[in-house]
Image: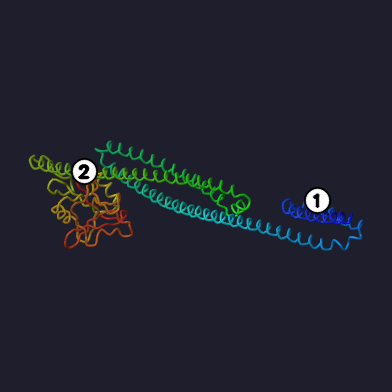
């Protein structure tokens, strides 16, 4: 009987240890909600042991050695549990290091994307600079076009040909304007995409996403890569449009050079025709017999032309109007002999307007009939276009002979007519 009671007490103690061991495992596996249940089981096992002790008080001293054995078993169980917890701690530490490594890689990817964004911003600024340069070139071409149109109006015989050329230039200009509008539209699209990327590149949002869900970060990284690829495609398209604009600019420049050459050829032909006409008139004058006075009253004859020096003073425009009213025009000097002759019909110290002006193009002096000036008799240091307001030519009579000078067209001077 005593042996049976002792076995019963030992069995109850082992049951309590087993219950305590499984209670510790359940605590780590199922956390606090299961802890109370396991504590109840452990308390039940302990209560059973106490009940056995109450029923068998005579065995109180006998199980003392068994209690030491139970304590040793509990110590072993706790040591095993501690080892298991340490193993779980090591596993969690390795997982933590892996998560830190993934976070570091994601931060590096974000830095690379930010660097790509800055590079795209620099390329955008460069494209803006190129666009402004192309706009300035376009404005310069338009200014040259306007000047060329004014000069072509003076060449009446080539008016129709030049008009068609100007129409072609206008069409090219409209095409260029349309292309520039497309570039501006694409730039606005890029601006909107840049703002979208700035929102996606928010570091705080990405950090929160990385802490909550690594897989979500990978998905967003793929989306950013797609956006980056789209930006690259847009960049290639802009570069293609820039190449097209450059080729159109070169074509316009070639057309402009061609028109300039045609204008120079026409001016040379016009000059040759004028010289031939003058020679024919001179020959006719020399061969025909005079039947009437060669020049009107107060006009002076030189070779085949008549010259008139005024005694009153007017502006350059008013002087030319007065000459035209007499069926003449302001003086055009074609030879050294003519220069010496007109120098003799103006008194010393007097100035007289002649048919010389650079009002169309500053620095390019032309006669009133549209022919360029080939031989000049300027005073030393002239023309100087003082303050940019001296656009008309005058004959200045000095002791050494007449010389040319530029003066303001509104100044009042004598004038010389020729017909």
Q: Quadrant of residue 296?
A: top left
Mark closer to the observer (1, 2): 1
Q: Which label belongs to residue 265?
A: 2
Q: Is residue 276 above or below residue 45?
A: above
Q: CA distance from mark 1 to mark 2?
A: 112 Å
Total tally of numbered discs in the picture: 2
Q: How is the image coloured?
A: rainbow
Secondary structure beneath dot 2 equals helix
Image quarter (top left, top right, bottom left or bottom right) of the N terminus? bottom right
Q: Does label 1 or label 2 sit earlier along the sequence?
A: 1
Q: Residues within 10 Å of mark 2 (few under 14, many from 20)?
A: few
Residue 57 location (% of width, % of height): 92, 60
- In-front residue for pair 174/314: 174
Q: Which label belongs to residue 15?
A: none
Residue 109 location (% of width, % of height): 52, 53
Image quarter (top left, top right, bottom left or bottom right) of the C terminus? top left
- In-front residue for pair 267/233: 233
| 403 relative to 32 in the view: left or right | left
Q: Is residue 236 above or below residue 392?
A: above
| 226 relative to 242 in the view: left or right | right
- In-front residue for pair 100/92: 92
Residue 217 location (% of width, % of height): 57, 49
Name the residue at 57% across, 50% down: 199
| 276 relative to 367 in the view: left or right | left
Q: Residues within 10 Å of mark 1 (few under 14, many from 20)?
A: some
| 251 relative to 333 in the view: left or right | right
Secondary structure beneath dot 1 equals helix
Residue 369 location (% of width, % of height): 23, 45
Q: Quadrant of residue 46?
A: bottom right
Q: Which residue is mark 1?
A: 37
């Amino acid at each position: 009987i005593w042996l049976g009671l002792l076995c019963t007490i030992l069995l109850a103690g082992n049951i309590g240890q087993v219950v305590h061991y499984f209670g510790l495992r359940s605590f780590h596996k199922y956390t606090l909600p299961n802890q109370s249940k396991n504590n109840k089981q452990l308390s039940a096992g302990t209560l059973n042991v106490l009940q056995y002790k109450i029923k068998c008080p005579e065995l109180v001293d006998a199980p003392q050695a068994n209690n030491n054995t139970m304590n040793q078993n509990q110590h072993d169980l706790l040591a095993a549990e501690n080892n298991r917890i340490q193993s779980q701690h090591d596993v969690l530490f390795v997982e933590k290091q892996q998560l830190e490594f993934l976070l570091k890689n994601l931060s590096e990817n974000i830095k690379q994307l930010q660097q790509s964004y800055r590079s795209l911003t620099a390329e955008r600024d460069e494209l803006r600079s190129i666009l402004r340069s192309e706009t300035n070139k376009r404005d310069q071409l338009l200014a040259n076009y306007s000047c060329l149109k004014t000069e072509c109006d003076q060449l009446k015989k080539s008016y129709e040909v030049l008009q068609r050329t100007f129409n072609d230039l206008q069409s090219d200009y409209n095409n260029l304007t349309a292309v520039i509008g497309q570039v501006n539209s694409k730039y606005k699209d890029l601006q909107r995409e840049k703002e979208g990327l700035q929102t996606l590149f928010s570091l705080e949002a990405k950090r929160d996403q990385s802490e909550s869900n690594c897989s979500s970060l990978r998905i967003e990284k793929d989306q950013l890569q797609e956006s980056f690829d789209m930006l690259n495609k847009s960049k290639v398209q802009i570069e293609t449009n820039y190449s097209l604009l450059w080729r159109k600019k070169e074509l316009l420049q070639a057309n402009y050079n061609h028109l300039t050459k045609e204008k120079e050829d026409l001016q040379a032909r016009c000059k040759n025709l004028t010289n031939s006409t003058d020679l024919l008139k001179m020959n006719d004058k020399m061969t025909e017999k005079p039947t009437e006075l060669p020049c009107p009253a107060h006009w002076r004859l030189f070779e085949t032309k008549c010259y008139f020096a005024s005694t009153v003073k007017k502006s350059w425009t008013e002087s030319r109007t007065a000459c035209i009213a007499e069926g003449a025009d302001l003086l055009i000097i074609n030879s050294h002999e003519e220069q010496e002759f007109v120098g003799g019909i103006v008194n010393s110290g007097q100035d007289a307007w002649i048919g010389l002006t650079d009002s169309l193009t500053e620095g390019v002096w032309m006669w009133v009939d549209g022919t360029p000036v080939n031989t000049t008799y300027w005073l030393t240091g002239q023309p100087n276009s003082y303050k940019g307001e001296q656009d008309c030519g005058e004959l200045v009579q000095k002791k050494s002979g007449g010389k040319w000078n530029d003066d303001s067209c509104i100044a009042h001077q004598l004038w010389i007519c020729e017909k």
